[in-house]
Image (cartoon, rainbow, N blue to C red):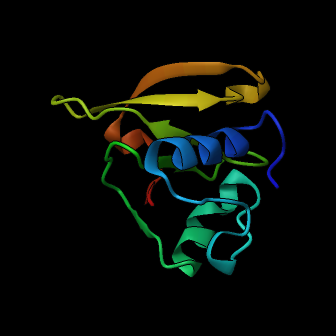
Amino acid sequence: MFYKRGCVSWAAWRVRRRLGVDFTNSYRGVHWGNANNWDNAARSAGVRVDATPKVGAVAQWNAGTYGHVAYVARVNSDGTVPLEEYDKGGTHVYGTRTVTKGSVENYIHF
């Protein structure tokens, strides 16, 4: 189980709902935990991790105590990436923002 009202629980819910992937904190037998572990967990679970945004991917950052994840809602023709996220900066609220492709550390493709 992911921490309630955190970025990881929200991103996991979004992946389940939008992609139909039965994603949990033990997906494919790997413990996913905090956002800053998701890139390593994905690789261990055989899930593709790269620098290419795609609708439905999870944007992932390792910085900070816990890292952060967000859901890629769109990829614009100018290379910007609109994200949906929860708990950015510890706010415990839903938000959207648009970032540049390269400002995201990793994209995880379920």
Quadrant of image for the C terminus: bottom left
Q: Quadrant of residue 31?
A: bottom right
How many marks the image carries: the answer is 0
Residue 71 pos. (x, y %): 49, 39
Vertical comparison of 75 with 9: above or below: above
Vertical comparison of 52 with 89: above or below: below
Residue 104 pos. (x, y %): 45, 44
Quadrant of image for the N terminus: bottom right
Vertical comparison of 46 with 36: above or below: below
Left or right: residue 47 versus residue 100 is right
The structure residue drawn at horizontal position 47% and vertical position 21%, both measured from the top left corner, is 97
Q: In which quarter of the image is residue 44?
A: bottom right
Residue at the outermost left position: 77
The structure residue drawn at horizontal position 72% and vertical position 27%, both measured from the top left corner, is 89
The structure residue drawn at horizontal position 52% and vertical position 75%, both measured from the top left corner, is 43
Q: In which quarter of the image is residue 76?
A: top left
Residue 34 pos. (x, y %): 75, 55
Pick whichever, 62 or 3, lies toward us.
3
Left or right: residue 79 versus residue 34 is left
The structure residue drawn at horizontal position 32% and vertical position 32%, both measured from the top left corner, is 74
Pick whichever, 70 or 79, lies toward us.
70
Left or right: residue 40 versus residue 54 is right
Pick whichever, 94 or 59, lies toward us.
94
Residue 41 pos. (x, y %): 62, 71
